[in-house]
Amino acid sequence: HRALARERPLELVSTFLGAHVPPPEFRRRPDAYVDFLARRLIPRVAREGLAEFCDVFCDRGAFSVPQARRILTAGRACGLEPRLHADQLERTGAARLAVELAAVSADHLDRVTRRDVELLANSHVVCTLLPGASLHLGVGYAPGRELVDAGAIVALATDFNPGTSPTLSLPMAMSLACDGMGLRPAEAIAAATVNAAYSLRRHDRIGTIEAGKQADLAVFDVADYREIPYYFGVHLNWLTIARGEVLY
């Protein structure tokens, strides 16, 4: 992270996801791994300034709601704000845990119920939708339209990783959100910019084009903003500026 930050003027924000799945040596003793995270790893990560947030994959085959609660509570005690991978493969109650803990974000949300949507909409939890993972795994999309209509804060991301969402394209994620989740183009753009910045607690200086904010700009060769998500898998970005420096 620090080496990358020195190479390019990018806004890099670190999250500690020590709780993705228990490692092999703790496979039969997941609670012992939770204890190891809470007592040793999380305090060290915080002490060395390696991350701002603490995340847990709370789902089938990963960590339970009680385990996630303990990990995230330990993280907050050390100054790491909580995020959750929530209700992606099964509805475990992770979205409700995110509301209970006033987490910064609940990501995925493919399996949430109508009541979960209502609770999220009445909270400050950012609902980060990851349609690339939904498409690649064939699990069905999160109820993006319902979340927006209920008044939830909805963000979008690529969830880039080689296992479940092998795409680097944020415009592609926006296309999938419009096509598969029912978002309108303007809603998808807001989700990918200002709402995403709010999720990172940087909305005061990035995420919108305003005087006094950081000059992070992406210019697309289109006649209408709605064409950005309309064309999927097409490279239409013409100019990229980060912190006022032209990168592309």
Image: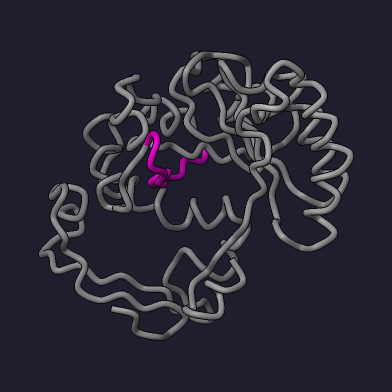
Q: Position of residue 110 (x, y in %)?
A: 43, 23
Q: What residue lies at 25% left-to-right and 71% top-to-bottom? A: 219
As drawn, which residue projects farthest toward the left? Answer: 223
Q: In the image, is residue 3 part of the stretch drawn in magenta?
A: no
Question: Quick check: 195 above or below 220?
Answer: above
The quadrant of the rendering that contains the C terminus is: bottom left
Q: Is residue 147 left or right of residue 166?
A: right
Q: What residue lies at 44% left-to-right and 66% top-to-bottom? A: 208
Quadrant position of residue 217? bottom left
Q: What residue lies at 76% left-to-right and 49% top-to-bottom? A: 80
Q: What residue lies at 70% left-to-right and 56% top-to-bottom? A: 52
Quadrant position of residue 148? top left
Q: Position of residue 164 (x, y in %)?
A: 38, 34
Q: Which residues are magenta?
A: 152-164
Q: Is residue 198 left or right of residue 16?
A: left
Question: Quick check: 175 above or below 223?
Answer: above
